[in-house]
Amino acid sequence: MNYGTYTTFASVANDKTVIKLKLDDIQASVNGKSVLLGMAPHLVNNTTMVPLRFVTEALGAEVIWDGNTQSVQLTFASQHITMKIGSTSAKVNDTALNLEQPPVIENDTTLVPIRFIAENFHQSVSFDDQTHEISIVNVPAVLTIPDNVAPAAERLEKPTVDNLTNITITRIPQFTDRTKYAFRAPYAEGVVMTTDGQNNLYLLGESSPQSFNIQKMSLNKGEELEIQFLVSFSKKEFNFDYKDPNGIMRDFNYDQFIPNSLYYDRNSDKIFVMGNDFNQELTVFYQVYPSVKLIAYDRSSDLKSKFDFIQPSDDGQTYYISNSFKGSIYTAHEGEALSTHTNIDSIRTHHLTSLMDKGHLYVLDQDNKTIQLVTPGVGASVVATLNVGDIKSAIAHEGNFYLMGGKQFYRVDVKGKLEEYADLDKAEYHKGLYNFKTNTFDPTPNPNVFVHPEEEEDKIEPKRIVLGLAPQRFIIDPKGNIIIYDDMYKILRRINLYK
């Protein structure tokens, strides 16, 4: 099987190319044109493997095959990938990486891990759980949006703040944290929310002491502000069997599950939830939208999901889950216990935030103020140390990390370039309650609580946002503005940065 050197038929450097494949189906397509594969794509150790010749021809890459060493070198634009049959060691340019599944030869056909190749050639990869279809899209250079470009809207001279809700007429779903205190002591309340980046918020709520749900709030101009019920955790779909540390099979029922964090993945349009059982002996990770299914679980009892994350990879089959207590990142597959992990440079119980950028996993440790590039199965390296004060909260959005600390918000890219994003000392506070339907401000209703006369004006028309009282939840809307839950006044507010 000496291929020698050849250049493939599809030169895609200047054209948008869409490649479609399906698991266990020899029929594929490139830009709508049918292509018959010599072997159907299929899973090997939970990794999608595809014939090498099809991959290189469809992408328009150059391949050099060395029959003596059974190694292959792929070149696409400025990217070079080197792999060897049966070896988990690979190279991308001069960087050594680890493969979860190495290339193999089956029936005289060389099969390679499609996600690893496509993502390292900076392609967009997605996987449809329902149809088992794999889509690979190359966007031409002339259409590529540069990394970390600020929104096109014009920046305001100084931030303005709108009150989006009022405690009298719109109560944000509150979540009771039943795992914070032992021995069933009083519970703390808070707001847990995430966003799809399209003006939709998703919030954890509860309808009874042991009945939890997710609610959706739409913040679209021209529409009435409303909160909709999305999914309840009181379903048998949440039940599963697992082995305890002694190897004994146990039942996990939905009424044992206490959710405490949400994650939305824009790549797959899915919502994930993490939580524990009441005794915190098991941490569980579910996909809850558009369907319910178990992703993974951890039975070590030292994973505290409020400090950790679940990060889907771009192939829709692999998930990265952090364990802040151990300073490690797990590689997980659906329905399995966490086992394979990569150590990172982190002090125990640090708050970690994840970000996928062009197929690479970055982790921000908000306590030691570092950004690390994680190579699953190999290790992690610090790529930036941030010169910033205390970080109270951090999120990832559109290829950047956003940090909250003091009276400031910051934006930082994966290389550590830090910029001031919003200074609340300069903010101007609007009076009234923002009306999404009319794009105007309605008079603020008086709160249904006793207010001391000296505090009345600020209680009704708050003139400040106090950051740092707790790790407050905030998100970035499609325009680049900040949506934050104000813990002091129990309302949702928007910090406007763009016209």
Image: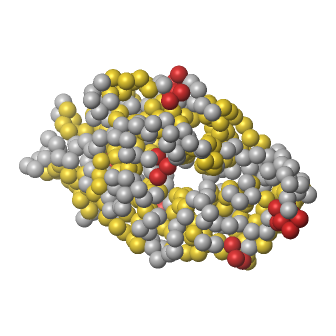
Q: Residue at x 89, y 55 (%)?
A: 446
At which x and y percent is residue 331?
Answer: 34, 44
Relative height, residue 240 to residue 146 (above, below): above
At which x and y percent is residue 150?
Answer: 60, 68
At which x and y percent is residue 75?
Answer: 29, 57
Q: Is residue 56 left or right of residue 355?
A: left
Q: Is residue 181 left or right of residue 50?
A: right
In this rendered view, identify the residue nearer to me: 95 or 69: 95
Residue 376 appears in view: yes
Quarter of the image with the N terminus is top left
- Furthest-left residue in this view: 68
Q: Residue at x 32, y 28 (%)?
A: 243
In this rendered view, identify the residue nearer to me: 382 or 24: 382
At which x and y percent is residue 450?
Answer: 86, 54
In this rendered view, identify the residue nearer to me: 451 or 341: 451
Relative height, residue 178 to residue 198 (above, below): above
Quarter of the image with the C terminus is bottom right
Q: Residue at x 68, y 57 (%)?
A: 487
Q: Is residue 186 left or right of residue 34?
A: right
In this rendered view, identify the residue nearer to me: 432 or 247: 247
Picture quarter containing residue 383? bottom left
Q: Is residue 443 left or right of residue 351?
A: right
